[in-house]
């Protein structure tokens, strides 16, 4: 076996020269030998949705050297391999601009993403990123992954490195240190700066601090992506702050997971989208992304007032243990709840509680009943505080209205992004968006409701993300661009993942191709890991590695 493997190339060479001889001697007649196929892979008989929003057209697509080499009429025999699309939709691979995949090297097949057509992930969102962007992107060459990776640099990560969890403003020297960290990350290939002003310690920062850091990202052509300070009661102020930061720092703004997360303001996405439209009319580049669900997912800690968390969890536990401060926390939490329009915390379900996984999948009201025998609001608040002290939990919050989700999706500047991590199959009861987001848009909002067209949905998942995050050679089915492609049956695509049973892969996706290599073949993950680290074009390093 070993011998034949070693001798393989030699035999091929002999065969090739024989073939050449044959061509020469048979030039005057007789059957010609088959020529070497021109392309690595040919996909025939596809309905191409090009990513730009154009109506689909029927074509064959040929790939060579990881690039799209031809879109038009190509014979299957011109490819070393060929796939008959049988009229299925061939689209650019989906670009998910809002992910949290700092752990991708532990789960390099990124199967939950691949199986819903995603070929590029942008991570480092909501203010949290790898502290060393160069190292993070560099790991892709040692530990190959199935999909392409790009990252933002996170403000919370940077602030924590310089100021810890302190609730104060930086000194001029500290601000310079933070700026230098943004600069370093941009030179290492970050696509922009992200903030999570909703979270500690970002919540302690004033607008001016963010503007100063965003100016550094602006110099390098980066984008400003933000999980805003407030998506509830003060959502309009937060949209205004985001736009102001972009305007003062001189860079495009991407508002992450755009939503109205307080019941009292359901329906007001009219007004918040209006703020974005007005900014665009003034010439400011503002875009948004969203996931296609009425529930969000984040930490349990986010239900507590920011002041409780200053200095970290150990400090927070001391405050909660102090009777006077405890009473204040309870009062403020109940006050926030009342203002939100929810009657209790039954809108909040546990996704993963490390201290007691029996609670996973249950609402806070159910957990309080189970643990304390009561499910009144006071018992629920006490239960939350106990769980915070025991290490916290990942949560799912059913806090949005469907009308807002639809209104936001219809907007031309909205892209589709999951806000998910790489899932470990079967672990916890996480938000289903990590398995189903793209599929759900195609199944529910395109095919089911007809809210947006197939072509527009694909545009929101491909060329718009590529344009916004400066991923220059991706996001469209065009000759010369990277061969990131997805083939799916638009009549069958669906998202079986639910809030109760999220660990279910999307269906209807047959082939996924990354840089010309097949990572999903007839619905099965191949184990190929052709993903590239995508560095920002203005960084010191090359774009791809
Ligand atoms: Zn976020």
Image: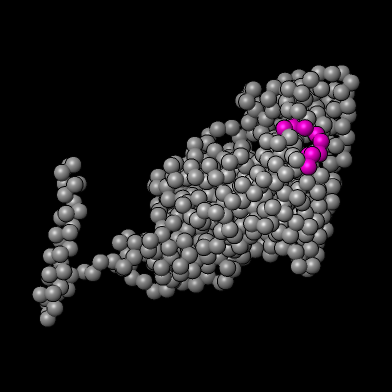
At horizontal 78% and vertical 30% (from top left) the residue drawn is 310
Q: Quadrant of residue 462?
A: bottom right
Asked if residue 21 is positioned above or below residue 171 in the image, the reply reads below
Q: Is residue 88 left or right of residue 34?
A: right
The residue at the far bottom in this view is 28
Instruction: Using the rendered image of the protein, determine whether residue 326 is visible from the camera's viewpoint.
Output: yes
Residue 170 counted in the magenta span:
yes
Q: Is residue 151 left or right of residue 347?
A: left
The residue at the far front in this view is 173
At horizontal 40% and vertical 45% (from top left) the residue drawn is 527
Q: Is residue 163 left or right of residue 41?
A: right
Asked if residue 216 is positioned above or below residue 56 in the image, the reply reads above
Picture coordinates of residue 456, whole percent (x, y): 61, 65
Picture coordinates of residue 489, whole percent (x, y): 49, 59
Asked if residue 449 is positioned above or below residue 210 in the image, the reply reads below
Instruction: Using the rendered image of the protein, determine whether residue 406 is visible from the camera's viewpoint.
Output: no
Task: Pick whichever, 363 or 414, lies toward us.
Answer: 414
Task: Pick whichever, 24 or 390, lies toward us.
Answer: 24
Q: Main secondary structure of the magenta part?
A: loop
At horizontal 39% and vertical 64% (from top left) the residue drawn is 63
Q: Quadrant of the N terminus?
A: top left
Picture coordinates of residue 266, whole percent (x, y): 81, 50
At horizontal 14% and vertical 59% (from top left) the residue drawn is 14
Q: Quadrant of residue 342?
A: top right
Picture coordinates of residue 21, whole percent (x, y): 12, 69
Q: Is residue 132 left or right of residue 156?
A: left
Asked if residue 528 is positioned above or below residue 369 in the image, the reply reads below
Task: Pick whichever, 444 or 150, lies toward us.
Answer: 150
Q: What span is in magenta?
A: 164-172
Q: Quadrant of residue 83?
A: bottom left
């Amino acid at each position: 076996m070993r011998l034949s493997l070693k001798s393989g190339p030699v035999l091929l060479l002999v065969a090739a020269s024989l073939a050449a001889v044959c061509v020469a001697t048979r030039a005057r007649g007789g059957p010609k030998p088959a020529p070497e196929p021109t392309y690595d892979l040919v996909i025939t008989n596809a309905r191409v949705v090009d990513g730009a929003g154009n109506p689909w057209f029927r074509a064959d697509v040929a790939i060579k050297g990881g690039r799209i080499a031809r879109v038009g009429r190509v014979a299957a025999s011109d490819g070393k391999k060929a796939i008959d699309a049988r009229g299925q939709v061939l689209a650019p691979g989906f670009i998910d601009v809002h992910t949290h995949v700092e752990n991708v090297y532990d789960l390099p097949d990124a199967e939950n993403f691949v199986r819903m057509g995603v070929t590029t992930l942008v991570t480092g969102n909501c203010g949290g990123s790898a502290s060393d962007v160069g190292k993070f992107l560099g790991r892709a060459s040692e530990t190959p992954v199935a999909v392409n990776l790009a990252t933002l640099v996170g403000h919370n990560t940077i602030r924590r490195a310089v100021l810890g969890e302190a609730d104060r403003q930086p000194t001029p020297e500290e601000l310079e240190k933070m700026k230098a960290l943004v600069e370093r990350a941009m030179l290492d290939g970050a696509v922009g700066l992200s903030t999570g002003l909703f979270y500690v310690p970002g919540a302690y920062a004033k607008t001016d601090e963010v503007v100063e850091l965003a100016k550094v990202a602006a110099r390098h052509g980066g984008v400003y992506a933000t999980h805003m300070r407030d998506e509830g009661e003060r959502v309009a102020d937060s949209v205004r702050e985001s736009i102001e930061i972009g305007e003062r720092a001189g860079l495009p703004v991407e508002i992450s997971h755009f939503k109205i997360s307080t019941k009292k303001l359901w329906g007001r996405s009219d007004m918040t989208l209006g703020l974005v439209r007005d900014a665009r009319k003034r010439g400011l580049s503002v875009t948004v992304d969203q996931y296609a669900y009425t529930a969000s997912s984040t930490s349990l800690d986010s239900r507590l007032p920011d002041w409780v968390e200053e200095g970290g969890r150990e400090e927070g536990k001391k405050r909660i243990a102090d009777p006077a401060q405890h009473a204040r926390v309870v009062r403020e939490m109940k006050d926030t709840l009342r203002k939100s329009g929810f009657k209790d915390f039954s809108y909040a379900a546990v996704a993963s509680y490390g201290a007691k996984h029996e609670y996973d999948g249950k609402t806070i009201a159910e957990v309080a009943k189970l643990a304390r025998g009561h499910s009144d609001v006071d018992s629920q608040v006490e239960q939350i505080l106990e769980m915070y002290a025991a290490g916290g939990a990942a949560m799912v919050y059913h806090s949005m209205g469907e009308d807002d989700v639809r209104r936001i999706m219809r907007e031309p500047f909205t892209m589709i992004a999951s806000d998910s991590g790489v899932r470990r199959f079967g672990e916890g009861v996480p938000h289903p968006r990590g398995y189903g987001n793209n599929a759900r848009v195609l199944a529910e909002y395109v095919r089911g409701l007809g809210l947006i067209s197939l072509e527009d949905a694909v545009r929101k998942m491909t060329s718009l993300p590529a344009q916004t995050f400066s991923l220059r050679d991706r996001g469209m089915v065009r000759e010369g661009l990277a061969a990131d492609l997805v083939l799916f049956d638009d009549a069958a695509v669906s998202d079986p993942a639910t809030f109760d049973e999220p660990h279910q892969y999307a269906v209807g996706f047959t082939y996924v191709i990354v840089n010309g290599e097949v990572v999903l073949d007839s619905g099965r993950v191949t184990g190929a890991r052709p993903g590239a680290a995508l560095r920002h074009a203005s960084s010191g390093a090359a774009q791809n590695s």
